[in-house]
Image: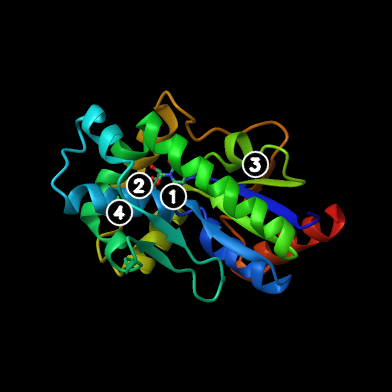
Amino acid sequence: GGGLVIAIDGPSGSGKSSTAKGVARARDLRYLDTGAMYRAMTWWMLTHGIDVADAGAVAEAAECPVITMGTDPDAPAVRVDGVDVAGAIRTDEVTSNVSAVSAVPRVRELLVARQREIIAEARVASSGIVVEGRDITTVVAPDAPVKLFLTASAEARAQRRSREVRAADVAATQAALARRDRLDSTRSVSPLTQTADATELDTTGLSLDEVVALVVKLADEAR
Ligand code: C5P
């Protein structure tokens, strides 16, 4: 297939989701939020009373939920066993437990395989796909012609995330983000890492439109 793949990694609040969706809309590409898949897996574990601190139990249970993703950037659906969990996966409970679940190797094996299927399908059946997460440039799609690492200052990231979740306490949001970034960057399997061949984009002083325009330019050059 000839569809374009744009891989975007970065820490929480760096602007990955808004950027990825904006680029997908601008160039009629599909959109995959891999974080939503780890959140969906975590939601299922919590709902079924699995102790997320027990990696063995998580690995065993990980085979059970059927996670399906919609890849329309205007309606990015997430379903677990047919149930729409788009809202349920954004709770504080899921957010504070997702790093433990995503650190389990079997969970990653299963979800990375699924992500690669979605990417392969998009390459054949559409003009391409924008994929965002923590290990897209390194593990899921290392051969993507466009690879980006988005960053932003800790303050900018906390402010954005607070606006998104309508939290009044920016300091508490910043502390929670720092904790999750530390867990995601230090785990042994596929930690969030910045590779030399990914283009770094510091979004701190930029508007969303500016970031989207920069990425669209890179995408057009890669075609
Ligand atoms: O992107 P988002 O903040 O929704 O991701 C939620 C969590 O999913 C991250 O904190 C990380 O633990 C996990 N994740 C991951 N690998 C990805 C995407 C997300 O481990 N590719």
Q: Residues within 10 Å of mark 3 (few under 14, many from 20)?
A: many
Q: Is mark 1 within 8 Å of ligand 1?
A: yes
Q: Is residue 115 above or below residue 99?
A: below
Q: Earlier in the sequence, mark 1 or mark 2?
A: 1
Give me the disc on residue 141: 3
Secondary element under disc 4, as helix, strand or loop, is helix
Image-based side of 55 in relation to 118, left or right? left
Give me the disc on residue 12: 1
Give me the disc on residue 177: 2
Q: Residue furthest left?
A: 49
Residue under label 4: 173
**Dividing the image into 4 quarters, which one contains the C terminus?**
bottom right
Estimate the spatial distance between the alpha carbons at disc 3 and disc 1, rounded to whole Å: 20 Å
* Residue 192 percent coordinates (x, y): 50, 35
* Residue 80 percent coordinates (x, y): 33, 60
Estimate the spatial distance between the alpha carbons at disc 4 and disc 2, rounded to whole Å: 6 Å
